[in-house]
Amino acid sequence: MTNPREPLILGVLVNPFAGLGGAVGLKGSDGADTREEALRRGAEPMAVARMTRALKAVAGQAGHLRVLTWGGDMGEQSCRAAGLPAEVIGTSPSPSDAEHSRQAARALLDAGAQLLLFAGGDGTARDLVDAVGEAVPVLGVPAGCKMHSAVYAINPEAAGGLLADLVRGGLVALHQAEVRDIDEDAFRRGEVRARHYGELQVPAEGRYLQQVKCGGREVEDLVVTEIAASVIDHLEADTYYLVGSGSTVATVMEQLDLPNTLLGVDIVRNEQVVAADVGAEQILEIIGDDAPARALLTVIGGQGHLFGRGNQQFSPAVIRRLGKAHIQILASRTKLATLDGRPLVVDTGDPDLDRQLCGLWPVTSGYEDTLLYRVATDAAE
């Protein structure tokens, strides 16, 4: 059960004209002229209804969600029809266009959305690449004619089910998914010209990897070794790494053949120890104000504390210097599963910072295997 005081902040966005031309043989819906022709031929918009179907899966968990949406048929109607309370943070003229979708997506992100659920097709996915990029995970409710991109659930109910898993604290993987689109004019002439347009971060159903299975469960030592290998393969040159306490991050040091302070913080740069067992002030002195710096840390099994228990060297000043994007959490699925859906906990001593750290975080849980997991200011009640 998730913490009612720290709800998941969901952004809901609908391209109301997505898929409009499909049923009437127009092979797409891009552009005002195509939209008008589709309506003239009697096409019925379907995207609003498809988003409603997805949202019904979480309507009963409204107490654990804060829903932000755009006015009218760009999200508000779907939320109301699903019985899901939502805050309308803006509106666009009707009929809306691609620029309105991009503006709405940026506004939802700026308002604090931790996950964007959108209904549309490849054109809408392209709009999200332009508007938010990889700044926030997105999940597509399929509603378009062309859906070559790998950002969509298989149907609206599947999107709703995956969202419900996230709200309940389930283990949900985070993938980098390709966005592709085709030339509609060429497609109408029978030519398929699809091209790569960009990438989005997309939640996907979490499953144990085949290579770390044994009797249906992870082999913990093997998983931690794979986590460490993934970290090492992605180390950046001339970057300071603050290696936090705990056995999971200790495995990174072991594989680098470096001495490690098991219950302290070491600083590594270019695969060499710069300083061992450092405090908060030492960290700030060494990394300075401008040098690239990242943190590698794990969580306390069973408790789920991320900051504030055994790693006070990560002071509010250090955390702010790093920034959330430069803090990498390492934890196996088994360790996360022991939390029974409770969020990871932050207790930095700075309530404002704690609130800023809340939300969905990527967690490295295997070799190039990433999960989305919630962070809150205390464990769920």
Image: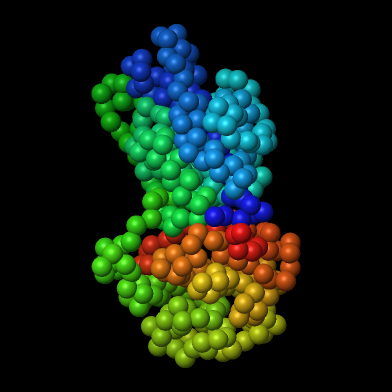
- Residue 234 visible: no
Query: Could you tell me which quadrant the N terminus lies in?
Result: bottom right
Question: Which residue appears at 63% of the width and 28% of the height?
Answer: 71
Can you say whether 201 is above or below 41 in the image? below
Determine which quarter of the picture holds residue 305: bottom right
Question: Which residue appears at 60% of the width and 81% of the height?
Answer: 310
Residues 278 and 303: in front is 303
Question: Which residue appears at 45% of the width and 23% of the height?
Answer: 46
- Residue 248 visible: yes
Q: How many marks?
A: 0
- The reply, left or right, for residue 37 in relation to residue 308 is left
Q: Position of residue 324 (x, y in %)?
A: 60, 63
Q: Position of residue 140 (x, y in %)?
A: 44, 39
Can you say whether 343 is above or below 45 in the image? below
Residues 369 and 339: in front is 339
- The reply, left or right, for residue 29 in relation to residue 314 is left
Q: Position of residue 153 (x, y in %)?
A: 39, 40
Determine which quarter of the picture holds residue 320: bottom right
